[in-house]
Image: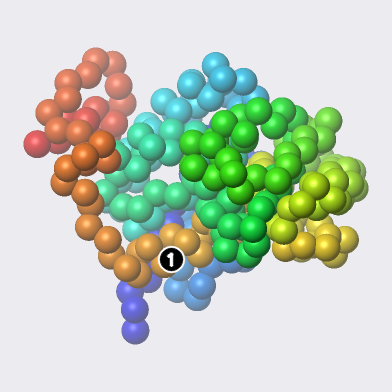
Amino acid sequence: MPAPIRLLVANANTTDAITDLCAAAARAAAAPGTEIVPATPRFGPAVIATRAEGAIAAHGLLALLAEHAGAVDGVLLAVSHDTALEAARQLLPCPVVGMTEAACFAACLLGGRFGLVTMGSVDPYRERIAQHGLATRLAALRGIALTPQDAVRDPEAVARQMDAAIAEVVAEGADAVVLGGAALAGMGPRLQRAARVPLLDGIACGVKLLEMLVALRPPKPLTGSYAPPLGRESKGLDPALAALLRRA
């Protein structure tokens, strides 16, 4: 019997209700024997909507991840901007996957071009998709004028607007659609009923990709830009994060 897998589902903002949504979606997607460990940073923005909040959240998220380093088999960043993804991937001894990264790559396995629908501005997603090297596979982006808080308070109102946004990106050539936003976690089945193409929930995709990566047991790179930092000094950081930077 394979050993149980422990996956950390790490929110990057401090809204516990969003952590709970993501944890429920992760457990629904996980295989038997996979344990989901949800976590929320102890400091940072309530919701990430600006570049400044993203930078602050990256610190809080890395401090949170450092506390779990060595105690989990994989980490899913339950934040739709994939906040601190590259830094987390370098620092931690286990695989790290971003939820939007996971959904976008999964979408590319289902069709030629994909779309993404979200709440609020689409610009951070356009930039992140380009960073993932997938700009030429992107058909369209749409953002609805509601917030993650609205998704927690009135998910049905959000779902109605998302249905329309999904139809628009499909009309522009999307063969699959990514649901961009941690607050949309678990809404896929409701939205799929009206959609004419597959919808990809980043939490579900991230869990399944992490289960695969953990099973493959890839070694940590010892050279290049993702090799762990060694002997880096710091001041004022949480002890666990400082230790990850300082390790010999």
Alpha-carbon neighbours of circle 1 within 10 Å: few (<14), some, or many (≥20)?
some
Question: Which one is in front, 82 or 183?
Answer: 82
Local secondary structure at mark 1: helix
Question: From what the image shows, is residue 171 above or below residue 224?
Answer: below
Q: Is residue 77 left or right of residue 47?
A: left
Q: Quadrant of the N terminus?
A: bottom left
Q: Is residue 33 left or right of residue 199?
A: left
Q: Quadrant of the C terminus?
A: top left
Question: How was this image coloured?
Answer: rainbow
* Residue at the farthest left position: 248
Quarter location, residue 109 = bottom right
Residue position marked by numbered label 1 in the rendering = 211
Residue 240 at x, y = what percent? 27, 34
Question: Which one is in front, 158 or 216?
Answer: 216
The residue sitting at 27% across, 61% down in the picture is: 218
Q: Is residue 180 left or right of residue 225?
A: right
Amino acid type for the residue under numbered disc 1: Glu
The residue sitting at 65% across, 45% down in the picture is: 138
Residue 184 at x, y = what percent? 71, 47
Question: From what the image shows, is residue 215 above or below residue 50?
Answer: below
The residue sitting at 49% across, 42% down in the picture is: 132
Question: Which one is in front, 151 or 240?
Answer: 151
Q: Is residue 99 visible?
A: no
Residue 27 at x, y = what percent? 57, 63
Q: Is residue 94 visible?
A: yes
The residue sitting at 87% across, 61% down in the picture is: 194
